[in-house]
Every structure is written in structure tokens, then in C-alpha cells.
Amino acid sequence: MLIPTGCADKTKHDPVHLADCIKLQQLTPEQEAKIRKEIHAREKALALDSLFRKKAKNQGFNGAVLIAQKGVILYHNVFGYADFGKKDSLCLNSAFQLASISKTFTGTAVLLLAQDKKLKLTDSIQKFIPSFPYHGITIENLLSHRSGLPNYLYCFEDKRRLNGPAPTNDSVLKWFSEANPLPAAYNKPGNSFSYNNSNFIVLASIIEKVIEVIEKKPSKPIQHTYEVNDTIPEKIKKIVTKVYRGKDINLTKTAESALKKITDLNLTHLPVCIAKTQYSFSDDATQIGVASDFTLTIENLIINRGAGFIVAVAGEIMRMPGLPKVPQAIYIDIVDGKVMGLS
């Protein structure tokens, strides 16, 4: 059981960074002590320990528990046995059979690789596993259980020995490749839905193949336009000189006043978004196309704190509102006849 109950870093609430919040953040002892005091960690840990011990004693709860809040672990414990027959107790490092829950992680990994353009959902199985004997099946077919593949659990039942080790992805692929006669497909690819473990056996193997290629030929390090620790003017100037081909920036008195407020609020770590005309790299709409060696005038700096960035306004421009990553609407509810979450 894993329950993240909040993240100290509000910039990491999107799915890509959620894993960073689950892990222990790099907090100093002083920071951790402060957070533990704020969230009443000791009281919560005692209450959680009492709750799970009662569940283990009275309801037979068997498993591991990890509950964290704001980057610190509130409670981490295990109850029961790893092997009931041998009475081997669980430990904090015990591994669990996730069964089909692992399909969620497999599917997510495939989509992340697709997002990074390491594979396409329209790719065939043979692009990664040339010897696979069933053709015309795409990664998307596998993800949606519309491949038409036979289920290895049934067509190779004689090979799955009840008292032997569980088959690996490689052994299942080998069964398919060496089968004679080849088990008949259930249907044509994309024709109908049929939940099937074979689909995710193949997907997991494709992930392994792609990762092997990435490890052999790693991508070049990402070159960021600016560093997080740069000042707001430094961030803007680097965008102007590196991306827009300008030479300098100029902050008006209004922008300088806004910069002081940003500094006083300790928000200089936020990323910068520049709002300007779409007709030119400069702030002058009459300089159509790629202007160069210009000075970009920043009229104002606006804090979009909910969305987590600073807008540098260059010239007259209509802006979209900076919406938060998590809409406040999801916190609105009616409790005992009263509307909550409107603040």
C-alpha cells in the first residue's frame, strides 16, 4: 500500500513528476524536522500504527504500508508473512507479485517511450522482435487488447508446469516462435476486444528492446536555455539572445517594480514565459519575421503563481489566464449543507 498525501514541491503535480514526490526529497534535517512539525507527523504515525496493527490482528491484513506527506515518510511497516506455508515473515524489502496491476506500469512505460519518440503506437511487433510469428499487429493493438493473439495461458498449458518456475517474457516469446503447429489467432488484429495476457508479455519485451538501444546509444544531454537558479532578468535575456536572436533586454520601471515584488516573495526560481507579438521575434509587430540584434523591452512581469511561472510582457498583447495545474473546482464540495473549498 503506497499513499502519497501531498507534495512539498507544487511544481511537480503533473503525472511526469509525481514519482519525484513519492520518493524522499533531498531535504536537510532542519527542513524535514520543520515539515514533520507542521504536519504533526508523530501523532499521525502513532495513529496509523494503531490502525494497521488492529487490521493485522483482527482482519488478517497482510502486506507492506508506506505513507508519505510533503516529501517525508509518515509511516513504513510490514505485517504478516511472505510465505504462509513456511511462516516466513515479510520484511521491508520483500518483493510482491503484482499480477495484472503491472499492466498499468507497462502501458505507462510504452506511452512514455512514444511521447519521447522512441517508438510509435503504429509500429509492428516485428520492428522490435523480428522472429515473432504473428504479423499485422501494432503496439496500439496490444495496448487495447485488440491484437487477436492467442492467450499463452491456454495454448501452452502443457508448458506451464505447476510446480516449476513461472515462465518469463523470453520463455513465452520462445514458445510462440518455436511452436509447431502455431496456435491459431483468436481474431484479426484490430477486429475485436479480447483481454489477453499475451499482449502485455509482448509489450514488456518491446520495452526491454527499446531500453537496450537507448542504453547503447544514449541521447545527448538536454541543453537548457537557462538555469533554474538564474535571476529573472538573466532568464529573459538568455531566451532573447539564444532563441530570438536579440542582443539585450530593457525593463521598464513597472517591470523593475514587479521584479522587486517577485524577489521579495522568493519566486525567482519560477520559469519564465514571454508574452509578445506573434509576427516577429522582437516586440515590434512591424519587424515581420526574423529580426536580429534588437533590444526586447519588458513592460511588466506578472506572477501566475497557481500555474507556476512568471509572464514577461513585451508590448501590448492579449494574454490567456494562467490556470493552475490542479483546478480549484475539484476541491469544492458540500459538507453538512455547507459549501467548502471556495477560498
Image (cartoon, grey):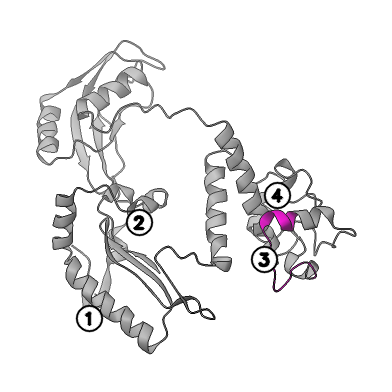
Q: Looking at the picture, which amino acid does disc 4 mark?
A: Thr
Q: Where is residue 249 in the image (x, y as percent from the top left)?
A: 22, 19
Graded by Cα atoms within 10 Å as few (under 14), some (14 to 19) or many (20 or more), the crowding at tag 4 reads: many
Q: Is residue 47 above or below residue 240?
A: below
| Nearer-N-terminus badge (2/4) | 2
In the image, residue 163 lies in the stretch drawn in magenta: yes
Q: Looking at the picture, which amino acid does disc 2 mark?
A: Ile
Mark 4, residue position: 138
Front: mark 4 or 3: 3
Mark 2, residue position: 22
Q: In this view, does 34 lie above or below 157?
A: above
| Nearer-N-terminus badge (4/3) | 4
Helix, strand or loop status at disc 1:
loop
Res. 25 mark: none
Q: How far apart are marks 4 and 1 (CA)?
A: 52 Å
Residue closer to the observer: 285 or 76: 76
Q: What stretch is highlighted in magenta?
A: 158-173
Mark 3, residue position: 165
Q: Position of residue 63 (x, y in %)?
A: 43, 74
Front: mark 4 or 1: 4
| Nearer-N-terminus badge (1/3) | 3
Graded by Cα atoms within 10 Å as few (under 14), some (14 to 19) or many (20 or more), the crowding at tag 3 reads: few
Mark 1, residue position: 337
Helix, strand or loop status at disc 4:
loop
| Nearer-N-terminus badge (4/1) | 4
